[in-house]
Image (cartoon, grey):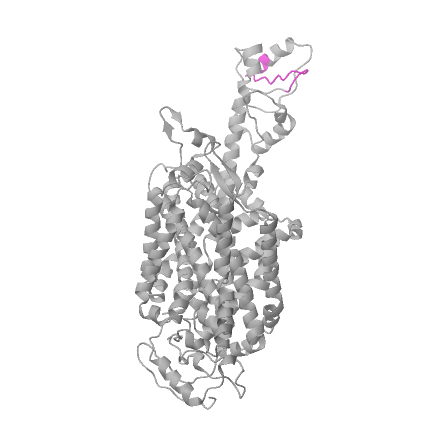
Amino acid sequence: MTSEKPPLPADGQRDESEAGLEVEQVALEAARDGWDSKVEYFLAQVGFSVGLGNVWRFPYLCHQNGGGAFILLYVLLMGLVGVPLFFLELAAGQSIRQGSIGVWRHISPKLVGIGYSSCVVCFFVALYYNVIIGWSIFYLGSSFQYPLPWENCPTEGNDTVKECAASSPTAYFWYRKALDITDSIDETGEFNPIITGCLLAAWVIVGLAMYKGIKSTGKVMYFSSVFPYVVLLCFLIRGVTLDGASEGIKFMFYPRLEIWADVQVWRQAATQVFFALGLGFGSVIAYSSYNPRNNNCHRDAFTVSGVNFMTSVLATLVVFAVLGFRAKTIATECVKRSVKMICECLILKHIIMPEVPYMYIFQKRYDVYLYVCVCCSNVKAVLEAMSSTPLPDLLINASDVESITLNEYEDWYMIQGQQLNIAGYNITACSLEDELKQGVEGTGLAFIAFTEAMTLFPGSPFWSALFFLMLLNLGLSTMFGTMAGILTPLTDTFKTLRNHKLLFTACSCVVGFLIGLTFTQRCGNYFVTMFDDYSATLPLIIVVIFQTISVAWVYGADRFLEDLKRMLDRPVPVVYKYLWKYVCPAAMLGLLGASLLKMILERPTYTAWNREKASKENLPYPDWALAVLSALIIVAFLPVPIGYIHFLLLERLGQSPADAEAGYVPCATTDIDLTPLGTLPPSGDDPNSFPPLLHENHGSCLQNGHIEHFESSSEL
């Protein structure tokens, strides 16, 4: 029987001498390093939880789902579900001191598949997440040009490229220059060499940051986790000074409480809480497993969650200040363009008085549209002399376009403008609110809407470089945590991988790059969308449900709270017992049901770019794509039932699960209590009782490369 196998109900009772020998054997194994400081750990947890979703997902959800009302709902779900589950993962990792595989196997060997499922999901996420980092690298490199390459439409001969003229320079650059995208997911196309090179650079950066484990990752976090806040503050200061920023922020936070009656809004809020904290990935567990055993993980749960939420609010302020400026600029240009169209006054110019300059707009007269633009009152008198009916009062002054406010134009449009029907001319409302209502998320926000707004800034290359450097660091800090969710549990579990950690890290990056080439095809963006929407959501929800049930019901919420009391040397509020046993499982089951219901009732679709129409369109996934996304969900969840069946087979064969799997090695940290929990025998006289996750000092293990002394405890 391997030394590191924790005592479980099926293992029977072992004597004290066997336990002592196992403790000594564990000490001879190579131990993992711990965090060099609490600051590194905190930055790592914040860096993992605060990612691209805080910048391009949370603002969109607030915008679409009631503004301030959505934020209140988000805070409610964060307090009832997010923080308790986040604390559960922090505490489990810190007390058992293993990655996700070791933690859930320690709780119950039947549920060891939960850890493997987390690794699979992390791998899927890493594949496409690094592609997004590659896109950020491409845009960062393109930002060192003046003017920015997406500021103006390119020309073919003397004419502007039609696709660009029909859309926008930023949309054209994104879809045609950066991605060179196909019209649908069915058109695979060749590889995009530039994006392939950027993907390679992204994996090299990740590999260099991960090659020494947390010793190298922790140092990188000082920059990658802090720098985005510097950029967000710079953008906030710049954004609030822009014309239109106040309109954008007011529109953003105006509460619409009626959205609370929509079940799908609750689903979206719960999903955002779920992903914002990185629940189920195993990365939170991996990072906390390197902590000293007396670390106050309860306080960490509130601190990291609070920082995550405040970051989302800060990003929302920045996004809508800038988008408010963009919307007002677009609406103002629309007013100028519309007034210019009207002042051409084709009816007047070609039929009535071709020699008259056009300066004012008049209302229709009789049953013929007669919008007359005149330069002075004597022309009006001439026109009135031609008719027995005086012309109406002037409603808008077109002689000074700059003086026309958006409100004045909107009032005129409601009274007169919408009655215009001049062939070949599209007179629109030019509404600021309509522009703000066109919410965008994800790549549409980062690579189209926000980049368009930055072209309007003085010194636009500087702001563009700052923005994409921020995206790069946000992506990398999350990517480091995602890779830790893969590497830590596997190196903890398999001795061969543990002994060749550097080679395993390098091979993982190489494999990730090779598979990631799928996303650098011309249709690669559609595969990124597929993986983002379906490879993680449902499997992670299922993983978290099993995690919560494992602790609250299999191991026991009361026993877990007692273990945490000994670990933290302070009582943990009993309210967590009821949250873990009832509220969190019910909420996660509701989220799972709502997500499944949405998939069943609505055929999954993706947003494609139509080259001929120069616009986006929603297309249903073809049957083969539905098969792929179904396979992603099944493969990610499959380790859970496989782990359960594997345990039952071993049990029927009379073989302990520990005999068939590699053992675990405890984490070497600076605290004095380093006894590997997995070596402790069952508590009390009952051989089938569960071991507590934490015991008092029973000795020491390998620390800083030296074998410390071991003492037998009377409790053993």
Camera-side residue of 637 and 209? 637
Residue 572 seen in render: no
Q: What residue span does the magenta drawing correspond to?
A: 363-379
Viewer-proximal residue among 468 and 490: 490
Q: Is residue 132 left or right of residue 86?
A: left
Residue 453 at x, y = what percent? 45, 40
Question: Residue drawn 64% across and 11% down?
Answer: 384
Q: Which of 715 and 348 is in front in this view?
A: 715
Q: Dividing the picture into quarters, in which one does residue 371 lie? A: top right
Query: Relative to 442, is 482 above or below?
Result: below
Could you tell me residue 616's position as x and y percent? Answer: 50, 38
Q: Magenta stretch containing residue 377, yes or no?
A: yes
Residue 124, located in which quarter of the rendered image? bottom left
| Percent position of residue 709, x then y | 35, 86
Q: Dividing the picture into quarters, in which one does residue 480 lie?
A: bottom left
Residue 151 sits above or below residue 54 on the image: above
Q: Which residue lies furthest to the bottom in this view?
A: 714
Q: Main secondary structure of the magenta part?
A: loop
Q: Is residue 296 above or below residue 236?
A: below
Q: Where is residue 700 in the image (x, y as percent from the top left)?
A: 38, 82
Q: Is residue 604 magenta?
A: no
At x 57%, y 34%, the residue is 431
